[in-house]
Amino acid sequence: MSEFHERVFSGVQPTGNLHLGNYLGAITKFVSLQKTHECIYCVVDLHAITVPQDPLELQANTREVTAAFIAAGIDPHKQIIFNQSQVAEHAELAWIFNCVARIGWLNRMTQFKEKAGKDRENASIGLYAYPALMAADILIYRATHVPVGEDQKQHLELARDIAQKFNNDFSESIARNGFGGAYFPLPEPLIQGPATRVMSLRDGSKKMSKSDPSDNSRLNISDSAELIAQKIRKAKTDPEPLPSETAGLAKRPEADNLVGIYAALAEQSREEVLARFGGANFSTFKSALVDLSVEKLGPIGAEMKRLQGDNVYLDQVLRDGAGRARVIAAENMGQVKQILGFVR
Ligand code: AQP
């Protein structure tokens, strides 16, 4: 048994085009974890500005993610929903973690390499230091569990490394100040189910992503029924019918992706989906996928639109959540300062 109180933390960037990958890889997990855990869900606007953002769009996108959280079923009264920039302790702990993390660790981060591309010299320092801020987001609450998509696995491992190094470097001070054998928990990634890495509808080798220039590559949570149907019908496939066993999905990334999406939306396994659709051609399967996607995403998209018409309410949710988050963050930050030897 861990000595730490179980707490869930996760975040979504307000960078627009919230899509099915964000929904299945992260938001649906956020919703179900409320039943068993105390949860803190954050709209990570400080992460968003690691690449250029238009201020008006950032505001709208922050409210869009907030609306998506609530529309998907997160209860803002029971759990905490807030935007990161309202709790200054995230940035404060991130600085300390910049001094704990090693350059060699950050140099291995594949997301930075992908996002910075060839023009690395011109990338922001924030984009490079992003994983240290992410570690701070989680650890300022001493969170123990982090639901994320597969793409965040490496950053979570780094957060664990930072927590471990802090615990080791300051072990004497941690003990002297009465915090036991370790101050930070080693946060566990929760990456489970059939859709931990939803792929582009146009290319089964690429992750479904907000920044893909083709809107047809993704299902946005707020897409209309017509658009959902159109995008699924256009989705890339291969000429073979669906296999009856999951082994038959190997080397068929597009088929595997659509089966995984169906399974996640239907809350079934790939095996169960293939037991029903094995031998079917893609036009039959895509029709069923359209119906299921519209059934699941339609009400969420409609509720998001309704909520996005009430900025006063959404901003109040974020302010209220930030107030509650700040209480936990301030207490932990005070303890971190004590451990570090900062005079207070
Ligand atoms: N394709 C995906 N499949 C499963 N999970 C995914 N996530 C993102 N894409 C997929 C998960 O969604 C959560 C929020 O992600 P984010 O908003 O913090 O940032 P991101 O990973 O940068 O999102 P994108 O869409 O991939 O944006 P760009 O285009 O900027 O790279 C995370 O838990 C993430 O794992």
Image: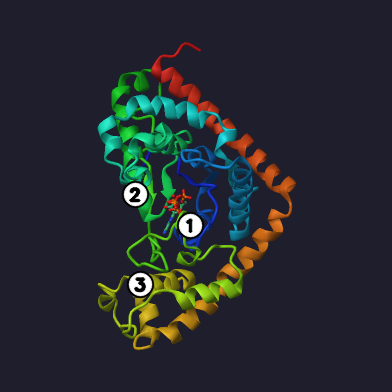
Name the outermost residue toward the top: 343
Q: Is residue 237 above or below residue 125?
A: below
Q: CB at mark 1 closer than 8 A to ligand 1?
A: yes
- Rendered residue at 25%/72% (across/down): 251
Left of 203 or right of it: where is 225?
right
| Colouring chosen for the image of the structure | rainbow
- At label 2, which amino acid type do we have? Lys
Dot 2 or dot 1: first in sequence order is 1
- Rendered residue at 51%/56% (across/down): 27
> Circle 2 sits on which residue?
153
Residue density around tag 2, few if under 14, some if 14–19, many if 20 or more, within 10 Å: some
Are the residues flagged by discs 3 and 2 in contact, CB closer than 8 Å? Answer: no
Residue density around tag 1, few if under 14, some if 14–19, many if 20 or more, within 10 Å: many
- Rendered residue at 47%/11% (across/down): 343
* Secondary structure type for disc 3: helix
Rendering coords of residue 154 (x, y %):
32, 46
Are the residues flagged by discs 2 and 1 in contact, CB closer than 8 Å? Answer: no
> Circle 1 sits on which residue?
22
* Secondary structure type for disc 1: helix
Q: Quadrant of residue 312?
A: top right
* Secondary structure type for disc 2: helix
> Circle 3 sits on which residue?
254
Which mark, residue 317? none
Rendering coords of residue 324 (x, y %):
61, 36
